[in-house]
């Protein structure tokens, strides 16, 4: 069966607010309370062919574009972040193989994923966390390797039927001292034990556990060759960090929808909450930031195809910016939602507080906030080499992409076209676009600020994690935000003429840039007009029960 | 197509000693060909950025992960002077 098209998946999955089944909010909240994995919902995703989206087309799957996969994960996350993480994490275990494995292993793993089997990445250890080069799990032998050690805080360690295991293959370690081994649990029967489920703050139903190996046999050769473990993990993260941003977008879509429905219906002081100016402004601001996050998250997924050399930098920008923005938005929406934001029942079956807890994980795994900000700092020189034309193909949403070339993915990019180039590119294509006159001075300001932050960041040159000062973290986070602002403008200018509708109206961009640059300085009258139009859109989308998406007008084929 | 001669081992070594001392913020006199990047407190990711700097300084193509495969200044200089450019295809 061919899978549901990504832009139609959201509709195919139904309205989570009114659905009593496995893909509805009430089901997700109930399972979360019981810390149960969403098994039935995962089965629904299998029925719709979602797993085939994780497998590249050249080995029998339907993964042709990471932009399509991003849309898929966003639609799932709109129902339940636990489900998006629990189901989607197979990507983390299998991407190393699809990016760097040999054809036999690729075919074997493709078959397993298409059959609906979860595959894990067994990477971190209890005592080492992000310090991967201190990992002690080791493998010895040549034709059949024997693995010993324990992996901890592993998504799907228990449910998975196989895992890519990060193991020391050279005693002295170092960046070439580790390899990724495909460990098939069926071949290792009796030589491994899974660890009990770890109790978490959010995504409580997820299988986050661990696995211990004792002389566990592994008959396949290391993925990408011996010593390639660290580089393959880092390249895999470039892909998954981008996808996680799209999961965050799905989660805030639902948080906003729940609060919009409340604000319309709730009567106070003889009116509705929606009539309170602060509440209206908060909803519009959240909607604008959500759409800007969507724009950059999709562009990031496209970047994996059109500029893989630079994707390591941009994936860190997104992995920092989008989940932290999601956390802020949900906090701000909680103010409008009042006491209800704290309830585990009632409106949307108590889904809001679950989203608030669930999204906390998104800025943690696959490289936490500090790791990503450090990666941005590491690119200060690459950014200074980046003068020139921005890779605008990433910003042309829904235009078909070339197949990804994993060999072009870099760990540290040599040259990055960053915030300044993206903003200059947007300025160069601004004529004739909606709100061009308001946006021009804003984007000129983006160029100025980006330049100042980048120059300052370049003067630091840290030697390693112990040189990462609070000032540097602050600079990197400011750079990430301004880079995201620039990229969202690039998406606007390059996608507006083709896609029209909401994206071309540009109200979302004016509001999100005004917010980033500081409100009050940018034609207050025009900003107010943008607010009213965006509010109309979110009310309309709430009524139609469709996603708050820049692409919501592009899925007319759905039923 | 012009074939570029790789720079000499000595020139590469001399340049790297200065560059590594600057990156690690140590006295250049304490850095020599046998110095491992790791011993100076340079993280493996910071060491990767040396490949870009080498490429800029000498106008040659440098395998991005050369400092992982050759963990000392002397070893990198020797590999590059012999024309080493490409890493494993899988990477």
Image (cartoon, rainbow, N blue to C red):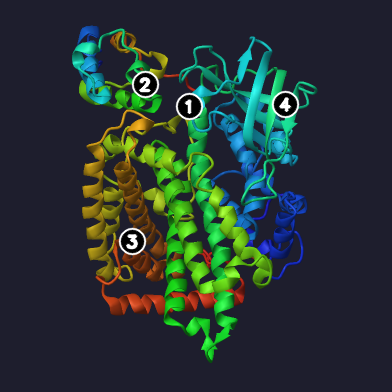
| Quadrant housing residue A545 | bottom right
Closer to the eye: label 1 or 3? 3
Q: Label 3 to label 4, Cα distance in Å?
A: 48 Å
Q: Residue A307: in sight, yes or no?
A: no
Q: Residue furthest right?
A: A190
Chain of the residue where label 4 is placed in the rendered structure: A
Q: Kindly check if marks 1 and 2 are in contact, taking CB atoms under 8 A apart as contact.
A: no
A361 is higher (above) or lower (below) than B80: below
- Residue with the mark numbered 1: A231
Report how far apart the C-alphas of labels 1 and 4 lie in the structure.
22 Å
Question: Residue A88 appears at what percent x and percent y?
Answer: 63, 45
In percent of width and height, residue A308 lies at 43, 38
Question: Which residue does the numbered mark 4 point to in the structure image?
Answer: A184
> Can you identify the residue that label 2 sits on?
B63
Q: Are marks 3 and 2 in contact (CB under 8 Å)?
A: no
> Which label is found at residue A516?
3
Number of the front mark, 3 or 2: 3
Q: Residues within 10 Å of mark 2 (few under 14, many from 20)?
A: some
- Secondary structure found at label 2: loop
Q: Earlier in the sequence, mark 1 or mark 4?
A: 4
Q: Are marks 1 and 2 on the same chain?
A: no
Which is closer to the viewer, label 4 or label 2? 4
Mark 3: secondary structure: helix
Which chain is indicated by disc 2? Answer: B
Distance from Cα at disc 3 to Cα at disc 2: 39 Å
A498 relative to A381 in the view: left or right: right
* Front-lying residue, A210 or A321: A210
Q: Residue at x 53, y 54 (%)?
A: A248
Q: Are marks 4 and 2 on the same chain?
A: no
Q: CA distance from mark 4 to mark 2?
A: 33 Å
Q: Where is the C terminus of chain A found, in terms of image quarters?
A: bottom right
* Total labels drawn: 4
């Amino acid at each position: 069966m061919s899978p549901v098209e990504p832009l139609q998946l959201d509709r195919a999955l139904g309205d989570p607010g009114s659905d009593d089944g496995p893909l509805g909010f009430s089901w997700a909240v109930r399972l979360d309370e019981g810390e149960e994995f969403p098994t039935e919902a995962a089965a629904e995703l299998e029925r719709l062919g979602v797993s085939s989206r994780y497998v590249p087309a050249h080995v029998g799957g339907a993964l042709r574009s990471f932009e399509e996969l991003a849309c898929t994960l966003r639609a799932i996350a709109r129902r339940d972040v636990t489900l998006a993480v629990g189901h989607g994490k197979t990507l983390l275990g299998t991407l190393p193989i699809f990016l760097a494995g040999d054809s036999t292993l690729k075919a074997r793993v493709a078959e397993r994923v298409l059959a609906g089997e979860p595959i894990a990445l067994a990477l971190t250890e209890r005592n080492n966390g992000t310090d991967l080069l201190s990992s002690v799990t080791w493998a010895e032998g040549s034709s059949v390797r024997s693995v010993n050690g324990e992996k901890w805080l592993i998504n799907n360690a228990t449910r998975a039927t196989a895992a890519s295991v990060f193991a020391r293959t050279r005693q002295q370690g170092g960046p070439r001292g580790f390899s990724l081994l495909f460990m098939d649990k069926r071949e290792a029967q009796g030589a491994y034990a899974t660890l009990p489920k770890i109790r978490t703050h959010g995504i409580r139903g997820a299988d986050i556990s661990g696995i211990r190996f004792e002389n566990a046999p592994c008959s396949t050769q290391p993925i990408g060759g011996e010593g390639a473990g660290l580089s393959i993990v880092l390249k895999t993260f470039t892909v998954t960090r981008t996808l996680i941003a799209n999961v965050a977008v799905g989660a805030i879509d639902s948080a906003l929808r729940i609060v919009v429905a409340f604000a319309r219906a709730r009567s106070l002081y003889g009116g509705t909450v929606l009539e309170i100016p602060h509440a209206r402004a908060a909803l519009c601001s959240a909607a604008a930031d959500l759409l800007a996050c969507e724009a950059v998250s999709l562009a990031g997924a496209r970047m994996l195809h059109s500029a893989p050399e630079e994707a390591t930098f941009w994936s860190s920008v997104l992995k920092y910016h989008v989940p932290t923005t999601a956390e802020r938005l949900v906090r701000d929406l909680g103010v409008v939602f009042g006491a209800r934001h704290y309830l585990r029942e009632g409106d949307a079956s108590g889904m809001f507080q679950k989203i608030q807890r669930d999204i906390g994980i998104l800025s943690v795994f696959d490289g936490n906030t500090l790791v990503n900000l450090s990666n941005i700092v590491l690119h200060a020189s690459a950014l200074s080499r980046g003068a020139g034309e921005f890779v605008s193909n990433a910003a042309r949403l829904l235009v078909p992409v070339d197949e990804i070339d994993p060999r072009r993915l870099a760990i540290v990019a040599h040259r990055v076209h960053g915030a300044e180039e993206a903003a200059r590119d947007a300025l160069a294509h601004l004529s004739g676009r909606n709100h061009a006159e308001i946006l021009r001075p804003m984007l000129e300001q983006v160029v100025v600020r980006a330049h100042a932050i980048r120059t300052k960041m370049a003067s630091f040159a840290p030697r390693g994690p112990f040189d990462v000062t609070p000032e540097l973290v602050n600079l990197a986070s400011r750079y990430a935000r301004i880079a995201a602002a620039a990229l969202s403008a690039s998406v606007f200018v390059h996608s507006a003429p083709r896609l029209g509708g909401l994206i071309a109206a540009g109200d979302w961009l004016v509001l999100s840039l005004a917010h980033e640059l500081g409100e009050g300085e940018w034609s207050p009258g025009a900003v107010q007009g943008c607010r009213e139009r965006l509010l109309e859109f979110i009310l309309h989308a709430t009524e139609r029960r469709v996603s708050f998406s820049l692409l919501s007008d592009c899925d007319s084929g759905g039923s | 197509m012009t074939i570029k001669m790789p720079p000499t081992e000595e020139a590469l070594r001399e340049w790297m000693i200065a560059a590594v001392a600057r990156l690690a913020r140590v006295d250049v006199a304490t850095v020599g060909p046998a110095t491992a990047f790791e011993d100076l407190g340079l993280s493996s990711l910071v060491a990767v950025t040396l490949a870009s700097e080498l490429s800029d300084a000498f106008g040659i193509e440098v395998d991005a992960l050369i400092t992982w495969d050759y963990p000392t200044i002397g070893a990198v200089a020797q590999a590059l002077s012999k024309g080493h450019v490409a890493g494993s295809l899988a990477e």
